[in-house]
């Protein structure tokens, strides 16, 4: 996070999904607006939608959210007299894009948030899993206005089943979220917290994290090799992620949902891109693949089958560019 906290600025939660849920309980009324990247993690926007949020979306490129587009969008909504409650951003190794929000854009995002007085939810489950390059300062560490709530989790670096995560922010918002949490589950499992605490206290996490990173780096490299081996750059494009869990692929001439049907016939699955668009207006020629689970051999086989599915789709009578 980049700076020292007082206990009143910290809340332990039952997974990072609960951070989003509690913040929505604390801030959102039905019909309020939330700003987010598009595409973005559908689990987060699904929770916001259940709380009645409407989505003001901002497109992304290889450096993350195009923050220069924010002022016009914010002013348009405010001119209609409607509230924008917070900005949601996945800053490191974005899900599903795999990119980082650049340092320059982080600084500009904070400037815009200060100008308009809008809180930021900085979601960072993947920042610990960096394969190369330098760490980029968190928005939370750069913020001097108390506008950022930072969220992270042990699920990507210890075990998802522990369901232990945390968030940090100014004491006012953390206090509200704490009261709401008491009404939801009283507290995060004390047993799970004790296990995580002891694991960290004994130095196991510090010792094991480099091995986790190296393990996932090899998986990433295996998928990169398979993509170059089995997919034509004339038909498919992607950006090699510097960390995290995901590749985001673009197939300009093929609807990803239809490609998935062919891939499933070969026992291969991926997530079509439209699932990551909260407005339902994009991602038709994109899909996300996770490289962290399968072995390098299985990854190679799976990508080979996807390549076969692409070629079979292109050979079908009546195939046209989408």
Image: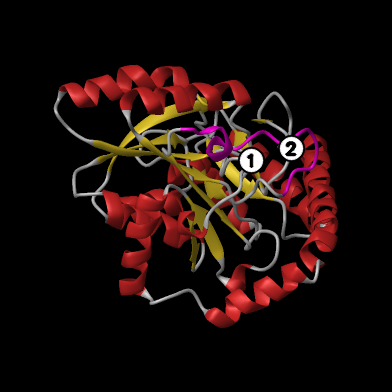
Q: Which mark is residue 242?
A: 2
Q: Nearer the viewer, residue 278 or 258?
A: 278
Question: Does residue 142 show up magenta in the picture?
Answer: yes
- Residue 51, given in percent of the width and then of the height, sits at 26, 55
> For residue 136, what is the image quadrant?
top right
Judged by its main secondary structure, the magenta piece is loop
Q: Which mark is residue 93?
A: 1
Does residue 242 sit above or below 79 in this rendering? below
Q: Secondary structure at mark 2?
A: loop
Does residue 122 sit above or below 263 in this rendering? above
Q: Is residue 193 left or right of residue 44?
A: right
Q: Is residue 147 left or right of residue 50?
A: right
Can residue 46 be seen? no
- Residue 143, given in percent of the width and then of the height, sits at 50, 34
- Residue 13, given in percent of the width and then of the height, sits at 48, 65
Q: Is residue 259 left or right of residue 84?
A: right
Q: Secondary structure at mark 1?
A: loop
Q: Quadrant of the N terminus?
A: top right
**Residue at left 31%, top 22%?**
73
Can residue 144 be seen? yes
> For residue 199, what is the image quadrant?
bottom right
> For residue 240, what is the image quadrant?
top right
Q: Which residues are magenta?
A: 129-144
Q: Are marks 1 and 2 in contact (CB under 8 Å)?
A: yes
Q: Nearer the viewer, residue 170 or 276?
A: 170
Q: Earlier in the sequence, mark 1 or mark 2?
A: 1
Q: How is the image coloured?
A: secondary structure
């Amino acid at each position: 996070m980049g700076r020292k906290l007082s206990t009143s600025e910290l809340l332990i939660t039952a997974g990072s999904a609960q951070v989003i849920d509690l913040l929505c309980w604390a801030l959102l009324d039905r019909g309020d607006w939330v700003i987010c990247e598009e595409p973005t993690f559908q689990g987060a926007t699904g929770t916001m939608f259940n709380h009645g949020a409407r989505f003001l979306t901002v497109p992304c490129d290889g450096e993350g959210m195009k923050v220069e587009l924010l002022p016009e969008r914010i002013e348009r909504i405010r001119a209609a007299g409607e509230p924008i409650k917070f900005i949601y951003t996945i800053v490191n190794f974005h899900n599903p894009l795999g990119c980082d929000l650049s340092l320059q854009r982080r600084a500009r995002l904070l400037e815009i948030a200060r100008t308009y007085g809008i809180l930021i939810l900085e979601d960072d489950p993947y920042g610990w899993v960096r394969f190369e390059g330098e760490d980029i300062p968190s928005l939370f560490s750069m913020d001097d206005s108390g506008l950022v709530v930072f969220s992270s989790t042990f699920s990507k670096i210890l075990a998802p089943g522990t369901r232990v995560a945390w968030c940090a922010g100014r004491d006012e918002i953390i206090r509200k979220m704490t009261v709401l949490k008491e009404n939801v589950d009283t507290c995060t499992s004390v047993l799970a917290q004790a296990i995580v605490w002891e694991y960290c206290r004994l130095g196991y996490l510090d010792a094991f994290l480099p091995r986790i990173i190296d393990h996932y780096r090899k998986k990433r490299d295996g998928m990169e090799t398979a993509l170059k081996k089995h997919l034509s750059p004339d038909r498919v494009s992607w950006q090699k992620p510097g960390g995290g869990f995901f590749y985001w692929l673009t197939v300009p001439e093929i609807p990803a949902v239809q490609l998935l049907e062919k891939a499933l016939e070969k026992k291969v699955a991926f997530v079509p891109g439209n699932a990551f668009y909260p407005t339902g207006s994009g991602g038709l020629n994109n899909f996300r693949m996770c490289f962290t689970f399968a072995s390098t051999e299985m990854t190679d086989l799976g990508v080979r089958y996807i390549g076969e599915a692409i070629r079979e789709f292109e050979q079908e009578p009546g195939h046209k560019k989408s």
